[in-house]
Image (cartoon, rainbow, N blue to C red):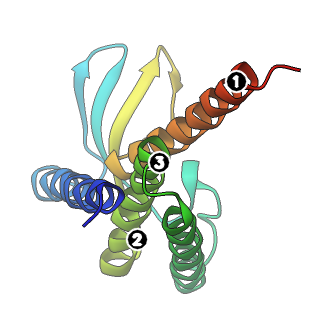
Amino acid sequence: MNRKGLILLGTLLLGVGLDQLTKYLVDTRFPVGTVKPVLPGFFNLVHVRNRGAAFGLLSTLSPEVAWLFFVLSTLAVLAVVGYLWYRLPKDSRGAALGYSFILAGALGNFLDRLRLGEVVDFLDFYLGRYHWPAFNVADSLICLGAGLLIWVIFTEEQGEHASHPH
């Protein structure tokens, strides 16, 4: 297996494994609705369920429609991102890691939707009364992957400009 494949395999195993383990621990130790202060004024562990998309978007859809929509849209995202990963040159480690993070995060939340019909969220950051919507490890992986891809795009573009002056 080439390095790009090892990056994907390792990221999927570790990322999905950590995501599902943390959700299992929250699910088995905290009833839904629990709020456990960790750093008062900044961070709580919570147990919330999200039937919608990021930040609760589309959470007002009926459970059946929401489930079907999110299963189909996640399959489409997995296919597109998987294809983009596949098309990468074998030496594109940064981009391979970015796509692998996104795939691991999407797969982690996809497993929740298949198993529970909704996603388990438990990380709650806030300042005073201003809360960031609760999220999970899978959401973090998706954001890290997107950020890494943006960084790779800008650094590759700067590298090209440096090596090809006008």
Mark toward the start of the polypeptide (3 vs 1): 3
Q: Mark on residue 163?
A: 1
Q: Could you tell me which quadrant the C terminus lies in?
A: top right
Q: Amino acid at mark 1?
A: Ser
Q: Are marks 3 and 1 in contact (CB under 8 Å)?
A: no
Distance (Cα) linking label 2 and label 3: 26 Å
Q: Is residue 133 visible?
A: no
* Residue 110 versus residue 42 in the image, above or below: below
Label 3 vs label 1, nearer the camera: 1
* Amino acid identity at mark 2: Phe
Please give the residue where the numbered disc 2 appears in the rendered image: 110
Ranked by sequence position, the earlier of labels 2 and 3 is 3
User: Relative to the observer, which residue lies in front, 77 or 60?
Assistant: 77
> Residue 84: where, in percent of width, then height?
57, 64
Quarter holding residue 108: bottom left
Q: Nearer the viewer, residue 12 or 1?
A: 1
Residue position marked by numbered label 3 in the rendering: 92
